[in-house]
Image (cartoon, rainbow, N blue to C red):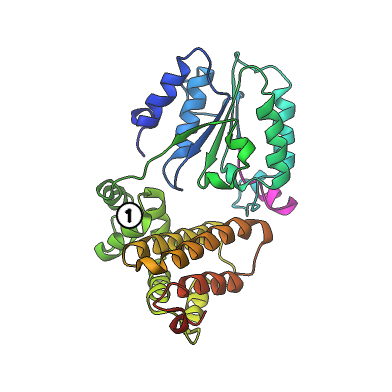
Amino acid sequence: MKNPRSTPAWSEWREARQGARMHHGWILAGKRGLEKRAFAQAAARDLVGDTGEGDHPDILLLDHPPKDDKEARKKADGKPYERARNIKIDQIRAMQRRLNTRPTMGDNRAIIIDPADDMETAASNALLKTLEEPPAGSTIFLIAHRPSRLLPTIRSRCRILRFAPVEDAAIHAAVADQSPETQAELREAAVHAAGGSPGMALSYLKHDMGKIDQLLRRIAHEGDRDFTLRGALSAAIGTRPDRERQSVLFDLSRAILTDRMTDTPREDLAKLADAHSDLVELAAQAPIYNFDANFLVMEIGGLLASVAGNRSSANV
């Protein structure tokens, strides 16, 4: 893991800290897997004056809670548990109650919401009230993989700190270090699919996405006239892919459409842009509506097939 304090983003954060008036809301924007949470935790510790590594009473972290009471009991027992698809309004309200009290150990308190673009609508609206009238000494870090999914009114009340993609050489080094047993060809595919995100490359390997990547690319280049490729893709994904595997599927699909920009005729670029826009919208809806996995595969496959050659051969 790269030291957050050695990044350009940290220099921007420190410069803001030394200013006369610092923003109370920060959006940490960038692709999944760029260590934005590590940065937020380091910035939060800097804010509350803590140099340790354990939990701090004035740093609140909101992420996906257990799916239900059964999963909550598993968490309490220290067992693996399934998470909910969204950050809930009850979590925001609990955080707001904490903000009505004084910080425990100093004058400042930090809140990290990861990822903020997975807040349910009611949670986003509730958070907006806090951003409009923030309690003194409170700073909120919103980790956003897709900032466009945040309410415009939330974005307008925060300072955006962007995390740039990482060079392929650095991703190669990270993958070689953390997955040395992986074949060179698969490592190369993971780095190519990562689009500048070390975390994406490692998720690619963790979830064995090589076959899925190949099927997605074939659909985007060849079409899928008889639905054979989409059937194979559905089998490869499985009937109940977990949250991270589903996220990698969407990330891969978006990356493939982005790659197509370089070899798509000018007259077909609008169709490519429409497919990408529809895919982004589908990715935003998936955590909310809990779509069937086969439905998602058919929809994603159809969007990819729509950019393969001419539309008649794609047969979407």
27 relative to 99 in the view: left or right: left
Q: Give percent across and percent down for residue 144.
A: 53, 42
Q: Nearer the viewer, residue 264 or 38?
A: 264
Give me the residue at 67% from left, 56% from top: 288
Question: Residue 73: within the magenta?
Answer: yes
Give me the residue at 41% from left, 49% from top: 199
Question: Residue 83: within the magenta?
Answer: no
Give me the residue at 33% from left, 29% from top: 6
Image position of 287 with respect to 23: above or below: below
Q: Give percent across and percent down for residue 41.
A: 50, 31
Check the picture and name the quadrant holding the N terminus: top left
Q: Give percent across and percent down for residue 60.
A: 61, 30
The three-letter amino acid code for the residue at tag 1 is Ser
Give me the residue at 46% from left, 83% from top: 312
Q: Nearer the viewer, residue 246 or 155?
A: 155
Which residue in the structure is indicated by mark 1? 179
Q: How many marks?
A: 1
Judge the density around disc 1: few (<14), some (14-19), many (≥20) Cα neighbours within 10 Å. some
Image position of 165 with respect to 261: above or below: above
Image position of 293 with respect to 9: above or below: below
270 relative to 74 in the view: left or right: left
Q: Give percent across and percent down for residue 106.
A: 60, 13
Q: Which residues, given as a range, are shown in magenta?
A: 62-74
106 relative to 93 in the view: left or right: left
Residue furthest out toward the bottom: 226
Q: Secondary structure beneath disc 1?
A: loop
